[in-house]
Image: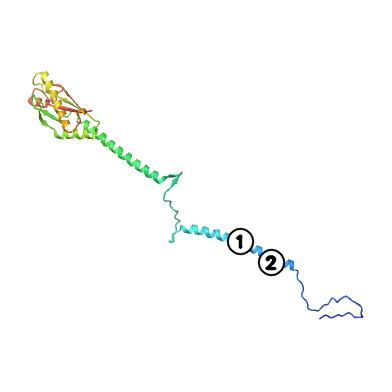
Amino acid sequence: MAFNLNKNDGAKTAPSKFDLSKGEIEKPAGRSRGWLIGLFGVLVVGCSIWYYATGKTDAAAKVSTSNVSSGPASVVIPATPAKEKAGNIDTTAVAEVKSSVIKNDSNDKAILVTSKREVAAIKTLNHAVPVTFIQGSSSFANVNRTLIKRIVSYMAKNPTASIHIDGYASSDGPIALNQQIAQARANVFKNHLTALNIEASRISATGKGIENPVASNKTAIGRRKNRRVEITFL
């Protein structure tokens, strides 16, 4: 309802400024919609940032907690690879090979030391007397069986070794005869070693006659000692 306070004289007049009639005030639609669109955009951007940030944080937390024990004193336990590789080379296998090589070298050195000791020990037997002989004969009078076993054992373990035998006689009888007997004694002992499976090609034998006596030829005991063979390892 509107009240017109102007006098109506039949003339057309402009409507009064006081319009008491009910009516809706029109709002500018353009500004409202723009404000809502801007707010929605801000919310979308904010949610995206929040989701991206929380996703990265959760992933990092999962990775870090997977290697942490649940005990009171949690310690990060890094994953241990089954085999370490460097430049496509299996370092574990290389370590095993090195270990085996070191062991083999140690064994070889131990064998070498043992061999040297054995050679040194057998060298001390040079000029030892394995047998003595009956007067005027190449038959054994006394036999050192322990020494002969050592000779055979050493020759068997060292296939490249060789041995030399010197045969001797006492001063009884002519010198020429004693020379023959001395050679016969060396040959007999050589045959004795070949019978014990030592190759004849590894044994040399020489008769020395009455040379290099180990005892006096003036006594019977001394002459018995001089009727002998001596060995020398080569």
Q: Tell me the residue at 39%/44% (across/down).
A: 95
The residue where tag 1 is placed is 48
Q: Is residue 66 above or below residue 167?
A: below
Instruction: Determine which residue is flagged by label 2.
Output: 36
Image coordinates for residue 45, horizontal then vertical, percent: 63, 61
| Residue located at (13% from left, 30% from top) | 131
Q: Is residue 94 left or right of residue 137?
A: right
Looking at the rendered image, the quarter that the N terminus falls into is bottom right
**Residue type highlighted by circle 1:** Ser
Q: The C terminus appears in which quarter of the rendering?
A: top left
**Residue 18 position within the rendered picture, expressed as x and y whole percent measured from the top left:** 83, 77
Report crowding for label 2: few under 14, some 14 to 19, many 20 or more residues within 10 A (C-alpha).
Answer: few
Residue shown at the point (59%, 61%) measured from the top left: 50
Q: Position of residue 211 (x, y in %)?
A: 15, 21
Q: Quadrant of residue 98?
A: top left
Q: Is residue 53 above or below residue 198?
A: below
Q: Could you tell me the amino acid type at mark 2? A: Leu
Secondary structure under tag 1 reads: helix
Say which label, 1 or 2, has the lower sequence index. Answer: 2
* Residue at mark 1 to residue at mark 2: CA–CA distance: 18 Å
Mark 1, Cα crowd under 10 Å, few <14 / some 14-19 / many 20+, is: few
Residue drawn at point x = 47 percent, y = 58 percent: 66
Image coordinates of residue 57 in percent, x first then y, are: 54, 59
Q: Which residue is nearer to you in this view: 222 or 206?
A: 206
Q: Nearer the viewer, residue 197 or 1?
A: 197
